[in-house]
Image (tube, helix red, strand yellow):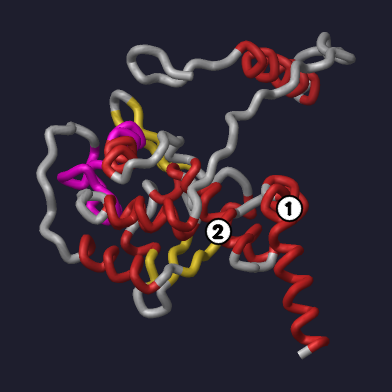
Amino acid sequence: MTNQRGFKQIQFSDRISIRVAAFRQAVRWKMLPDDPCAGVDLPPVKRPEMQALSVEECRQFLEAARGSEWFSLFALALTTGMRPSEYLALKQSDIDWQRGTASICRTIQVFGSGWQFYDTKRKRSRRIVKLQDFVLKVLQEIRHSPPRTSDYQYPADHDLLFQSGGGAPLTQRAVKREFRRVLAAAGLRPIRLYDLRHTAATLAVAAGVSAKVISDQLGHASISFTLERYSHVLPSIQDEAAARVERMLMG
C-alpha cells in the first residue's frame, strides 16, 4: 500500500513484527533483561496475491514492450526472475558479455536526496544468472548507446546498466509507470512489476527446469521454499512427466 506521494506505508502487522524483533535484539544485546513480547502470537502476514503471465501473454507483453525505451529491462526481468532492486543495481561490469551471464551482488534503493547500494537480500541471493541470447543482444544495444541527460541531481555512476540519464539510477517508480503503460498497450490485465519475477519462475517450472536450478536462479533461501511457492504449477508438470515416461516405456 502506498500513500499519495507514492511512499510505501507499513501495515499494522508489519509494525508489530518490527517492534517484536527490536525487543528480541535488545535482549541479545543485554539492553533488556527479558523479552516483554515473549509468548506473543504475531498476526499472520498477508502476502500480496501472486500473479503470473501465461506464455501467450508474455509474447504479447514483449511485443508491446519493443516500443518502450526500457524493452531491455523488461526482457531481462521476465526471463531471469531478478528482483527489481537487483536489476536496477546492475552495472555494466556485472555482465560477462562473452559468457552471456549477469552477476547479482548488490541491490539499490533510491530516495529523495540520493541513492544507496546495499547487500543482497541474503547470501544465496548473490548469484550468477544465464542470459538468453536475445536479452544479451538488446543489453548490448543500450551498452553502446550515447549517454542521456537528466534533470535529477543524484550522484552519478556511469557504470550503471540502466540509467535515467547522466549516470543517475533508474527508479522503481519510473519503471512501474512505464510497466503499466506497456501492459495497457498489450491489452493485458494490470499486475505488479514484481510479478515478472513470478512469471519467470512459473515459465521455468512449466518448461520442466529442475527446482534446484530455479531456486538458484531466483536466489531463494532453499529448494523447499521454491517448491512451496510454485506448487500450483506442479500438477501439470507431473502429468507431462508421466506422459514422457510412458512414451519411453511403450515406445
Q: Is residue 207 above or below residue 16?
A: below
Residue found at x 33% / y 36%: 180
The x and y percentages for residue 22 are 69, 18
Q: Nearer the viewer, mark 2 or mark 1?
A: 2
Disc 2 marks a residue whose amino acid type is Leu
Q: Is residue 161 magenta?
A: yes
**Residue linked to disc 1:** 227
Residues in magenta? 155-177
Q: Is residue 65 magenta?
A: no
The x and y percentages for residue 46 are 66, 24
Q: Quadrant of residue 11?
A: top right
Is 191 on the left-hand or right-hand side of 148? right
Q: Disc 2 to disc 1, how far (Cα)?
A: 14 Å
The x and y percentages for residue 221 are 69, 50
Residue that sits furthest to the right in the current view: 39
Q: Is residue 73 above or below residue 183?
A: below
The quadrant of the rendering that contains the C terminus is bottom right
Residue found at x 29% / y 43%: 182
Residue found at x 27% / y 51%: 64
Disc 1 marks a residue whose amino acid type is Leu
**Residue linked to disc 2:** 203
Dot 2 or dot 1: first in sequence order is 2
Q: Is residue 126 above or below residue 117?
A: below
Residue that sits furthest to the front in the current view: 250
Q: Which numbered disc covers residue 84?
A: none
Under circle 1, the secondary element is helix
Residue found at x 42% / y 78%: 99
Say few, some or many: other residues with alpha carbon within 10 Å of mark 2 (under 14 / 14 to 19 / 20 or more). Answer: some
Residue 26 in sight in this render = no
